[in-house]
Structure formats: structure tokens, C-alpha cells
Image: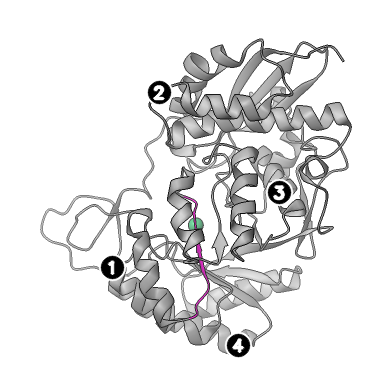
Amino acid sequence: MATITIRDVQTFLVQTGGPGARFVVVKVLTSEPGLYGLGCATFTQRYAAVVGALKHHVIPFVLGKDVLRSEELFQMNLVQGYWRNGPVLNNAISGIDQALWDIKGKLANMPVYDLLGGKCREGAAVYTHADGRDPQEVLENVQKFREQGYRYVRIQMGGYGGKQDSLPKPESAPGGAYFDPRAYTRNMLRMMEYVREHVGGEVELLHDVHERLSPIDTVKFAKDVEPFNLFFLEDSLAPEDIEYFRMIRQQCATPIAMGELLNNPREWRLMIEERLVDFLRMHVSQMGGITAARNAALHAQIYGIRTAWHGPGDTSPVGHAANLHLDLWAPNFGIQEWCRFDSLVYDMFPGLPVVRNGYMYPSDKPGLGIDFDETLAAKYPVKDEVDWWTQTRLPDGSPTRP
Ligand code: MG
């Protein structure tokens, strides 16, 4: 077979909702007429920086290269900038990497899960998000999703960090998304107790701390939620505090999930090899794409750790398709996060995975099985807006992690 090369790479910015849903889609065109691949490079808060990294640094390097050599291109892209790692560069690398897996699948006339080793399961179990203003409303939303067939539901109350009606701020306190970590833990325990009491033991409940607590408060919280039998407690610690997971492990058996903020194998190696977490949930485009995620999944499998790739509304539909192919293949798949896209997104991305009765299924097309309507997408350009919810503040007004 004659070598097929990368002829052009296009980038698309699409925003179908608020500032938390600005997608970066990469299209790799090849020397074979009509053959192209799609990849997700979505870093929704810094989308223009990813496009710049692609345009000036990654695309000039990959043009003319053999489309089948995705491993070599991935490895060289990691290092050819000399200074390396980080969400901007890794997302740019992922856009190319995922598109090359898509192309490889189209050439082989196989879905990507078959290239990885074939399916271990027919559908991927998903969890979705329930929120509410009070425990009763959270419960109502959990029950609504139960009726739709979801068996796993993440429960929050008042968004990340919880909403407090009034906080004692100092005079002249600046604007921002204020929260009180101590009130948050009290309110969440009250909510979890109420929901668990009413749904019984069969619904799997999850919760995302979103790194809102101090390390020692996190240790206490992980112990306090143990009676509610969570499927997992997510991002209870920040990446810079990973060593505190040792303390949680010594004191309770709450299952721990972590990873969406991680960029590099050195950041998840400790968590895997010391068995500090139960679920790896990296953002596949942020770690560099399918190649990086495949490697992490296999590393985790040796240690009995399962996958739970990040799958919120700020992963593009192409990224959700990539997640699903990894899920269907991975022997150590755990659960997949799912954000329930509306019909506009399905129209824009034909072949977007579907969820029925709590399981996610791919299209029957080769590669990633997803396409992209560029004409429709052009009607939904991104807007340069400053995110409000990420301007998080403690009660005294000091900035903290969102
Ligand atoms: Mg999360």
C-alpha cells in the first residue's frame, strides 16, 4: 500500500452552550481523497491557546507524515518542543492523535475498539449528574434519572462547593463564586444521608468534591461519607496534595477517583503504584489522546485500578466517542461519565454515541464512528468570555481552586 500522508489539518471552534462548552475539534485530511480523521483538543477555558499551539507548532511538524505512524508522532510531539507537558500542548497533541486513530480505523474498516484489542463489553455503563437546591430536589432528580434507566448517579447540591445563602464576607469583598468549605461538608453529609435513605442500596451514588477542601478536611470527609456506600468520591484532593491519599487509605474504604487535572504519567504513576485510588478519570485529550489513555489504562490494570474517563459537557462529542472506544475495549473499565447532549449537538456530530437504559453505545461506522457538520458548526462560533464560576473565593474573599 502506498504511504498515505497528512495533507492538511484544520481546527474548528464551536460553542453550543455557555462558556463551559467551547469545543476544539481537529480534522486531519490525508493524501487519500475523502479520507480524514477527527480528534478532540478541547481545553474549554483556553481554547485559543490550543489552536495557536496546533497552528504554529504541531501542524507544521506533522504535515507530510505517514498517517499510520501515530505512536511515533505522539512520542515526538511530546518532546519536540523541548519544554513539555501541560494542558495546552497535550490537547493539541490529542487532536492529532485521536484523528490518526480515526483514520487508522477507517483504513482498516474497523472501529477503534477493535484496533485496541476488541470489545470486552457491548455497552459502557454511564453515570450522569443530579443536582438540586435541597436534599429533596436532589432526590427527585436521582429518581428521574432512575426512571430513564440510569443506575449510577452523581449527586451534588448547589453545584461544586455547595451554595450557602449568606456568607459573612469582609467589607468591600470583590465579586466571585464564594463558598464555605466547612458548611459544604455539613450540607453534603445531610444531603447524602437523605438520598441514600430514600433510594435504598441499589442505586450507585457518586460525588465530586472538586478539590474544594483542605487536605485534612478531605480525610475527615472521606471517612464521614463511608456509611453512604458511594461508588466513588471524586477529586477529593488537588493534584498537588496527592500524598494525602495515603492518609485516606489508612483510615477508610471509601472508593477514590481522581485524574481530570492530570497531564503526565509522572502525575498518575504514584497513585497507581501505591494503589491510592480506585478509578483513573483523566481527561483523555488533556493527557495527549487515545495513545496516552491506552497506556495509562494498561498500567492501572496491573494494579487492580479501573478507568472512569472524564466525560462532562466540556469534552467535545469527538472526545466522548474516543472515551467510549476505550471503555468498550479496556479490560479494567469501571464507569463512564455522561453529560446528555441535546439534539443540536447530535445534528452537528452525526454518529455521536447514544445512551439507552444506562449504557452507552457507538455508531456502527469504522474509526471513531463520528462525523462533523462544519456548515452547521459555523453558525455556533465561540465567544471570548471570562468564566465566572472559576473565580472561586473563600468566605474572606481569598481566591481558591474552582
Ligand atoms: Mg470532576
For label 1, being within 8 Å of ligand 1 is answered no
Please name the residue that numbered disc 2 is placed on.
82
Q: Nearer the viewer, residue 114 or 308?
A: 114
Q: Secondary structure at mark 4?
A: helix
Residue sticking out furthest to the left: 171
Residue found 59% across the figure and 29% down from its top: 74
Mark 3 is surrounded, within 10 Å at the Cα level, by few (under 14), some (14 to 19) or many (20 or more) other residues, namely many
Mark 4 is surrounded, within 10 Å at the Cα level, by few (under 14), some (14 to 19) or many (20 or more) other residues, namely few
Residue type beneath disc 4: His
Q: CA distance from mark 4 to mark 1?
A: 27 Å
Please name the residue that numbered disc 4 is placed on.
198
Q: Earlier in the sequence, mark 2 or mark 4?
A: 2
Residue found 50% across the figure and 23% down from its top: 51
Which quadrant would residue 116 be assigned to in this image?
top right
352 vs 376: above or below: below
Q: Nearer the viewer, mark 3 or mark 4?
A: 3
Q: Earlier in the sequence, mark 2 or mark 3?
A: 2
